[in-house]
């Protein structure tokens, strides 16, 4: 990397729009081989996949999985020298967008394998021998990443799964239980994070291993079911006395957390791509429905209340696409550090896509609440708007919950301020000049001027919090969250303007008009966040919460019935080998990869 990322500079008060500039040409056009693959994928999805069937049966048919393997959907980014397609990152994101609009579980199937599954850790940290051994297998075999355990949530330092080295056999013996392993129910290969005990040979610590899913002692104990994402092969995996060759350790002992975070960084834009697809699909449905549905003598889209919803959906869809395209381009070029940009994209996209889906359901009225199958059964078009709402809800939780991600970003930003590695701008300073064209459309110039001043105010707010001791910061997480949300909004404004400017020569006034609408909406949200920094109910809310946890308000719960079933809040892993049958589904023998 030869330049800092836009996000890192933003939190120091520098609106470096020159870091977002796209090269000449149509930013939507990919290389010919990328476009050819996406055409094959689209044709397969349209002809061979029934999203309604996935939803009804809560599983992706084996024939669909095999068909995706045949066209190379599991090896889009695996280098060609190891049997993969070796296509671009933006092609991969477009592929996720395509399959997600058929059914959300398809996107998770591919993303869990390629974004955080075995290919990424091996490409980034594997030895050449490991690459030759495992990457060709990942072309057709499915992988899963296992980190979470019943009691660790976002705190990996409480991990209980162990990996004890056995010098005599040259193996590690793994024991533990992993929860919510996406793809784990059907995986052929697992990336397992486990704690190696400290010894004279080294400090041990969290370490990554490649584990064969059919190895003795590996059992899928439970296939989980969720609010949405029906068809997701996610479950509980037990490891009991599993012998793993030392050659299957990825990286050094104790490097597991670095490997997990690095793999997550490279795939961080996967969720924004899925969110962008959901927003674009919502836009199509909203546009068609608002034109067809007539109330009080005219289409509902002409009524002011509905028009506001349409504008929000359209502007947000454009912004989310801009995030994926602009940040995806710069991440692939490797010239700038886009890690913080991608984290901001994940945070913003997961929150805004959920709002888009909610507005779509509201716009559709009773038909938005009705299932697609029910509507089709009575003769109307089946539109899975309620399904979209259920499927998108997980985005605010997994891959770093919104609350955890806000705290993570804020902590990193404050540490940078405290360390002196970057100093915020002083009032009146402009920082490095932006690389704006003199011919930039006026609305974009105006919004960038607002964002530049807001970035200065943001940096000063961060600097004020950086002066507080850590003991006080613990009671300021909501304030830190507002600071991060302001940064996310400013990032979204900047990439949207950059994308609109790149598209303007080929697509007329449309991109600039959409960017103008998005920035106008974003500016009002930013103003509200700055106001909440100055005037909020945080202290009073904390006092209420403490009394609530002290059981001071249990009288308010009178008159309700607790419908939850028995058992502890968090189940302790059962000791010893599992007796529950393995649920992993066997699939037909693989065919040749095209």
Image: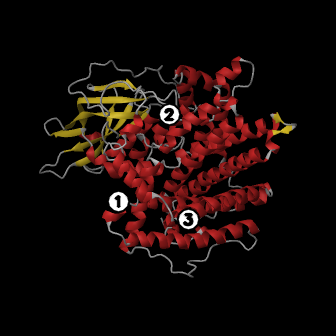
List the residue tagged with mark 1: 474
Q: Position of residue 285 (x, y in %)?
A: 72, 37
Q: Residue 585, located in which quarter of the rendered image?
A: top left
User: Disc 3 on helix, strand or loop?
Assistant: helix
555 left or right of 165? right
Measured Cα–Cα span from mark 2 to mark 1: 37 Å
Q: Is residue 456 above or below residue 568?
A: below
Q: Determine the residue positioned at 65% across, 69% down.
A: 448
10 Å crowding of disc 3: few (<14), some (14-19), many (20+): few
Measured Cα–Cα span from mark 3 to mark 2: 42 Å
- Front label number (2 vs 1): 1
Q: Determine the residue positioned at 27% across, 43% down.
A: 159
Q: Nearer the viewer, residue 144 or 314?
A: 314
Looking at marks 1 and 3 on the same chain, the residue that comes earlier in the sequence is marked by 1
Q: Is residue 508 above or below residue 272?
A: below
Q: Nearer the viewer, residue 504 or 517?
A: 517
List the residue tagged with mark 3: 531
User: Disc 2 on helix, strand or loop?
Assistant: helix
Q: Position of residue 566 (x, y in %)?
A: 33, 24
User: Disc 1 on helix, strand or loop?
Assistant: loop
Q: Position of residue 499 (x, y in %)?
A: 67, 58
307 left or right of 185? right
Please tell me the numbered disc located at residue 109: 2
Which colouring convention does the figure follow?
A: secondary structure
Looking at marks 2 and 1 on the same chain, the residue that comes earlier in the sequence is marked by 2
Q: How many labels sit on residues?
A: 3
Please tell me the numbered disc located at residue 278: none
């Amino acid at each position: 990397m030869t330049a800092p990322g836009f996000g890192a500079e933003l939190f120091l008060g520098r609106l470096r729009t020159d870091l977002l500039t796209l090269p000449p040409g149509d930013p939507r056009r990919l290389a010919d081989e990328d476009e050819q693959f996406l055409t094959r994928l689209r044709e397969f999805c349209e002809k061979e996949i029934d999203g309604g069937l996935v939803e009804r049966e809560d599983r992706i048919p084996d024939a669909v999985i095999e068909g995706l393997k045949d066209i190379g959907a599991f090896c889009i980014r695996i280098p060609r020298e190891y049997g993969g397609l070796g296509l671009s990152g933006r092609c991969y994101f477009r592929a996720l967008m395509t399959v997600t609009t058929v059914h959300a579980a398809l996107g998770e199937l591919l993303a869990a394998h390629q974004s955080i599954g075995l290919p990424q850790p091996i490409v980034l940290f594997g030895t050449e021998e490991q690459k030759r051994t495992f990457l060709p297998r990942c072309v057709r075999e499915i992988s899963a990443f296992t980190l979470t355990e019943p009691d660790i949530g976002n705190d990996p330092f409480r991990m209980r799964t162990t990996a004890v080295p056995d010098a005599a056999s040259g193996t590690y013996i793994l024991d533990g239980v992993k929860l919510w392993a996406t793809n784990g129910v059907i995986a052929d290969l697992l990336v397992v994070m486990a704690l190696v005990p400290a010894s004279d040979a080294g400090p041990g610590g969290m370490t990554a291993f490649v584990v064969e899913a059919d190895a003795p002692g590996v059992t899928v104990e439970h296939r989980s079911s969720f609010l949405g994402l029906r068809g997701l092969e996610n479950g509980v995996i037990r490891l009991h006395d599993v012998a793993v060759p030392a050659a299957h350790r990825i990286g050094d002992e104790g490097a597991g957390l670095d490997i997990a975070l690095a793999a997550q960084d490279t795939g961080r834009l996967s969720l924004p791509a899925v969110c962008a697809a959901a927003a674009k699909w919502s836009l199509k449905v909203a546009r068609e429905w608002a034109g067809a549905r007539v109330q009080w003598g005219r289409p509902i889209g002409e009524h002011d209340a509905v028009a506001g919803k349409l504008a929000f959906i359209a502007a947000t869809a454009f912004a989310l696409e801009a995030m994926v395209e602009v940040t995806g381009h710069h991440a692939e070029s490797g010239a700038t550090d886009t890690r913080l940009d991608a984290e901001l994209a994940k945070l913003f996209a997961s929150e805004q896509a959920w709002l888009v889906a909610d507005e779509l359901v509201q716009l559709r009225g009773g038909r938005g609440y009705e299932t697609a199958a029910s509507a089709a059964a009575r003769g109307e078009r089946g539109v899975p708007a309620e399904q979209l709402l259920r499927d998108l809800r997980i985005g605010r939780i997994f891959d770093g919950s919104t609350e955890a991600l806000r705290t993570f970003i804020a902590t990193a930003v404050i540490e940078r301020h405290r360390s002196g590695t970057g100093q915020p701008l002083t009032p009146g300073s402009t920082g490095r000049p932006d690389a704006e064209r003199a011919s930039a459309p006026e609305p974009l110039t105006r919004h960038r001027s607002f964002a530049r001043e807001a970035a200065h105010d943001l940096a000063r707010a961060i600097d004020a919090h950086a002066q507080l001791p850590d003991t006080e910061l613990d009671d300021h997480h909501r304030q830190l969250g507002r600071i991060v949300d302001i940064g996310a909004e400013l990032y979204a404004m900047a990439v949207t303007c950059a994308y609109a400017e790149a598209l303007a020569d080929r697509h007329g006034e449309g991109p600039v008009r959409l960017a103008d609408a998005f920035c106008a909406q974003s500016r009002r949200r930013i103003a509200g966040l700055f106001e909440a920094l100055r005037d909020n109910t945080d202290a009073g809310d904390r006092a209420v919460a403490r009394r609530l946890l002290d059981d001071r308000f249990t009288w308010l719960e009178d008159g309700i019935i607790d419908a939850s079933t028995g058992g502890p809040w968090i189940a302790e892993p059962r000791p010893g080998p599992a007796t529950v049958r393995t649920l992993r589904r066997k699939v037909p023998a693989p065919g040749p990869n095209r």
